[in-house]
Amino acid sequence: MVKEILKKYSTAEDNLISILHDVQDSHPEHYLCDKDINEIHRYLNIPIAKIYGVISFYTMFSLKPRGKYIIRVCESVACHVMGSDDLVEVLEKKLGISVGETTKDKLFTLETAACLGVCGMAPAMMINKNVYGNLTEKKIDKILKDLKAKETYVNESEEGDKLLDKENQTQILLNNFGKIDPEKIDAYLKVGGYEGLKKALSMKTSEVIEEVKNSGLRGRGGSGFPTGLKWSFTAPIKGEKFILCNADEGEPGTFKDRPLMEGDPHKVLEGMAIAGYAIGAEKGFIYIRGEYYRSIDRVRKAIKQAEEKGLLGEKINKSDFNFKIEVRIGAGAYVVGEETALIESLEGHRGNSRVKPPFPGQKGIWQVPTIVNNVETFANVPGIIKNGAKWFKGYGTEKSPGTKIFVLSGKVKNPGVVEAPMGVTLKDLIFKFAGGMKDGKKFKAALLGGAAGAFVNEKMLDLKMDYDNLMANGAVLGSGAIMVMDEDDCLFDILKNQMEFFCHESCGQCLPCRVGNAAILKLLKNIEKKKNLTGKEWDVIIQTAKTMKETSLCALGQSPILPISSLLKNFEKEIKKEAK
């Protein structure tokens, strides 16, 4: 079986992660055994120690046998707030095993996952490729009973992304979601699909870049860097170049890119092709997180259909422009969301960040200039080229034009997805679109931008959600994630969960992140247990986080300072009473 799998791939090292996925999936016990690893080693001529190093880095790979059904319970902030810890205990009791173990009949293996990207249906778990959300003990009973009764595995993943209050949304990105068949290119073409690409091909490449510049489009992955400006740095460089779409959506609380890939994949591909034309690249990659099985399937189908229509591949739309797109699959690593770690992973390595500069636009994939943008960023491009920069600037604010996809989870009545103009208030997103607080509870806090974001209190509900306004108020837009907490939630406990996440996801490459996260978590646990307290714990935590921000190699190590400092600023009394 392994030899047959290897025949599908060249001996290039960047195929390693794809091969590991296929080999593990083919094994009846869902793991990578020594014999198979040796086969891979001989075929790719990669040191066997390196292969084990890659396997051990990514959480989706296993070196020990597992059961027929692998249960992965999400432990992210969004699921934690909704009671995932209790569900782990329920599963342990019902299965008679602990996390990391397999039942004696080899039917079930129980694992936890840092984040599954299904925060809108928290608490959630994934069993093999199927997602089950809004879990209760009763629902878990039924799921386990049904699986025990089945002779074969059935793909029946639940649909999780709901558009909230659709009639009042401003949709230029999600305008096709739920209205067209995402698996049929003709449906996309009927609503004007690929017209932006066709128009771009009639323009000079410099004119395309200038249009994107004039639109004011800023990166939607979290950084907010001007997209057209980024492209303009790479375009003049001669020689081979690449486009890389970052679809490794691993930030807890974030599920904004999946609706685009699953509901309107051609829009993302069209944006990538326009970017390729603008900078002179003929090859693109879209790196999708490994847990997004439906996204992977639909994007692959969309690429094949676009090639058949002459809209990807050679001589696109009968022009001289060639552009191919290849899907690469992640394997479970939050840090790979950082652009250079993403590139390292795509090349078949552990997802360790690179030192910057040089930036990917100068030296990216295989040291070739590479434009890295987020799914949502690319999805904005076709509309900008088709309708013009002025049209795009008609939405949002002066410095943050356009719309933004916001995703709400936690203690709201209706978790889900909202597309709204930049500058919409936090209050409108929570109380208008999401229907207010769940069970009539009182709003306490919201964590904006994901686990690496900022806590805001009730006084900040009128904040306008755009890059500059949030930054001026000590918060961030980040990915657009909004995790809501009510009066019953313990914010200290949530911070501890975040630090457990950062410790787990640190790649360990640089000392400040590797040691600093563990030190902060240890202090929080001491505070929680009232153990060895000096009264200066919070001063040490802040100083450690500040040092990490200044000295860590990538954003993971630089991140803890924001949730910690914002929590102390906006909830000082509640947090510091824990240390007394």
Image (tube, rainbow, N blue to C red):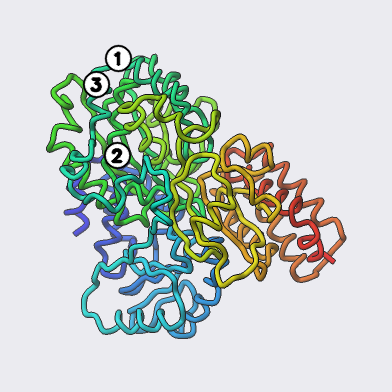
Can you give x and y, in whole percent of width and height, for residue 404 in the image? 47, 42
**Label 1 neighbourhood size at 10 Å, few (<14), some (14-19), many (20+)?**
few
Q: Nearer the viewer, residue 514 or 1?
A: 514
Q: Name the quadrant containing residue 238.
A: top left
On the question of residue 515 being in view, the answer is: no
Left or right, residue 38 beside residue 525: left
Which residue is at a point 46% across and 34% down the rendered structure image? 395
Q: Which mark is residue 201?
A: 3
Instruction: Indicate the amino acid at tag 2.
Output: Lys
Instruction: Indicate the amino acid at tag 3.
Output: Leu
Can you give x and y, in whole percent of width and height, for residue 257 in the image? 40, 47
Instruction: Please tell me whether mark 3 sits on a helix, a strand or a loop.
Output: helix
Q: Is residue 352 above or below residue 56?
A: above
Which residue is at a point 21% across and 42% down the rendered structure image? 188
- Residue behind mark 1: 204
Q: Which tag, 2 or 1, sits closer to the chain's start? A: 1
Can you give x and y, in whole percent of width and height, for residue 286 in the image? 33, 40
Can you give x and y, in whole percent of width and height, for residue 135 in the image? 44, 74
Q: Is residue 438 above or below residue 329?
A: below
